[in-house]
Amino acid sequence: MAVTNFIPTIWSARLNESFKKNLVYGNVVNTDYEGEIKGQGSTVKINSIGTVTIGTYDKVAGIGNPQELDSAQKTLTIDQGKFYNFTVDDVDAAQANVDLLSGGIVEASYGLANVVDQYIAGFYTEVKAGNTIGNDTTPIIPTSSTAYDYLVDLGVILDENDVPEGDRFVVVPAFFYGLLVKDPRYTKDANVMRTGFVGSIDNMSVYKSNNVPNTAGVKYKIIAGHKSAISFAGQVDTVEAYRPEKQFSDAIKGLQVFGAKCIKPEAIAVLTANKS
């Protein structure tokens, strides 16, 4: 064997981390019932009160019998469970001279968060009938001069459904954001303050995400809404370190359980948009 085949391998002490998306949807839902979950399969009953009737007072007829309040109940089920399970060989760990297990946990945590982000984004299908602009058959094709207006139109839909002004949001894909920044109405007061946040339009916080639901890069589902619309609950159920029986290595496995429920369909609006 030629001497040139014996090429030494140098293990770097620097970890090369992967590119990561901005995780957004977890920031635009509420976690009001998160403390009430007990693990995968558990459920939380969410009660809501119906409308109180306002009557016209007549001093002769009086006010009559009291109205019996209606109540509605929805169930948030913790029906999702995602895990990671990875190992680092003892030799690899020694040669690399870095804490590969810690790096792996960071990557795994991000991976779980990304799965949750996509899961929450999928609740656009719960939108109230009539709270949509465009559809899969006739999607909107926005331009740099109309993209801003379409987001305003989503805000009008929320207005017409009596959705509170505070805690509103809209999540757009990268191509749509690119159109927005070409419009001076948007750029005059756009700024980046937190992960994914790229400004405000019509009292809505605008976020940019690569997790906006779409079909093969078309028919993007741009969701606008209020934080109260979707309730999310999740918890890290288990994290364990162990030594695999048939390997000289350290391993880490973890499980996260979660679930979500759209409890106010009237508080979301959806724009279906194509790039071109």
Image (spheres, rainbow, N blue to C red):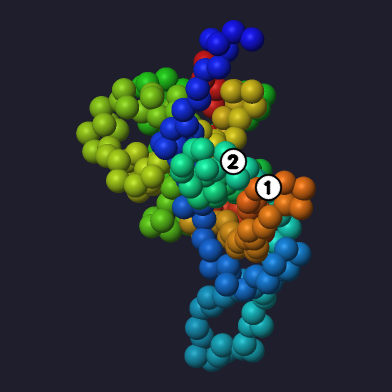
- Crowding near pointer 2: few (<14 within 10 Å), some, many (20+)? few
Residue placed farthest to the left in the image?
188
Residue 156 can be seen in this image: no
Percent position of residue 276, x then y: 52, 15
Q: Mark 2 and 1 residues: CB-CB less than 8 Å, in contact?
A: yes
Percent position of residue 70, x then y: 67, 75
What amino acid type is highlighted by mark number 2?
Val
Percent position of residue 119, x then y: 63, 46
Residue 191 can be seen in this image: yes
The quadrant in which residue 259 appears is bottom right
**Circle number at residue 91:** 2
* Residue found at x 46% / y 42%: 97
**Circle number at residue 248:** 1
Residue 78 vs residue 222, the one in the foreground: 78
Percent position of residue 71, x then y: 67, 74
What amino acid type is highlighted by mark number 1?
Phe
Q: Distance between the residues labelled 2 and 1?
A: 8 Å
* Residue found at x 55% / y 11%: 3
Residue 251 vs residue 96, the one in the foreground: 96
* Residue found at x 42% / y 37%: 13
Q: What secondary structure is marked by label 1?
A: loop
| 207 over 105 or under it: above or below | above
